[in-house]
Image: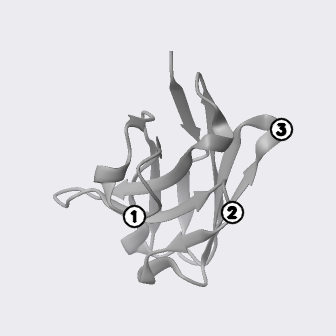
Amino acid sequence: EVQLQASGGGLVQAGGSLRLSCVVSGLDFEDYVIGWMRQAPGKEREGISTISHSDGSTFYTDSVKGRFTISSDNAKNTVYLQMNSLKPEDTAVYYCAAGVRGVGLSRRLYDYWGQGTQVTVSS
């Protein structure tokens, strides 16, 4: 059974930091692209960052570039999202997802999803 367990969310003041973790099991971790998506109330789910294990390449949506960093620990089957300089508009439920259809931020590329972790940034 494939499982993606996201954790690390919470309540933080604007300008603060959080680190999200996504522990993956039930699939060959290094064969998959792992992405982080988020969904704010009343908005569509958007891709914000992704990492490819085939070449280590990373991608970010423009709104988080320079503030968020995605990384992977293959020994722990875990992908992290370090979020710095958080803003109220970063408030959302954050999901991690896994896929093999290619690298990108489109949610259509991902087949397996975690349950989400809430990030709330107060002003």
For badge 3, the amino acid type reads Ala
Q: Position of residue 123 (x, y in %)?
A: 44, 75
Query: What is the secondary structure assignment of the residue under circle 1?
Result: loop
User: Is residue 16 toward the left or the right of residue 74 in the image?
Assistant: left
Q: Which mark is residue 115?
A: none
Return the residue at label 2: 55
Q: Alpha-carbon neighbours of circle 1 within 10 Å: few (<14), some, or many (≥20)?
A: many
Q: Position of residue 105 (x, y in %)?
A: 39, 64
Q: Alpha-carbon neighbours of circle 3 within 10 Å: few (<14), some, or many (≥20)?
A: few
Query: What is the secondary structure assignment of the residue under circle 2?
Result: loop
Query: Of marks 2 and 1, which one's residue comes earlier in the chain?
Result: 2
Query: Of marks 2 and 3, which one's residue comes earlier in the chain?
Result: 2
Chosen colour scheme: one colour
Return the residue at label 3: 75
User: Is residue 85 toward the left or the right of residue 99 in the image?
Assistant: right
Query: What is the secondary structure assignment of the residue under circle 3?
Result: helix
**C-alpha span from label 2 to label 3:** 16 Å
Q: What residue is at 70 percent from the left and 41 percent from the top? A: 78
User: From the viewer's perspective, is the residue at label 2 or at label 3 nearer?
Assistant: 2
Which residue is at the front of the view, 10 or 68? 68
Return the residue at label 1: 105
Q: Position of residue 4 (x, y in %)?
A: 53, 32
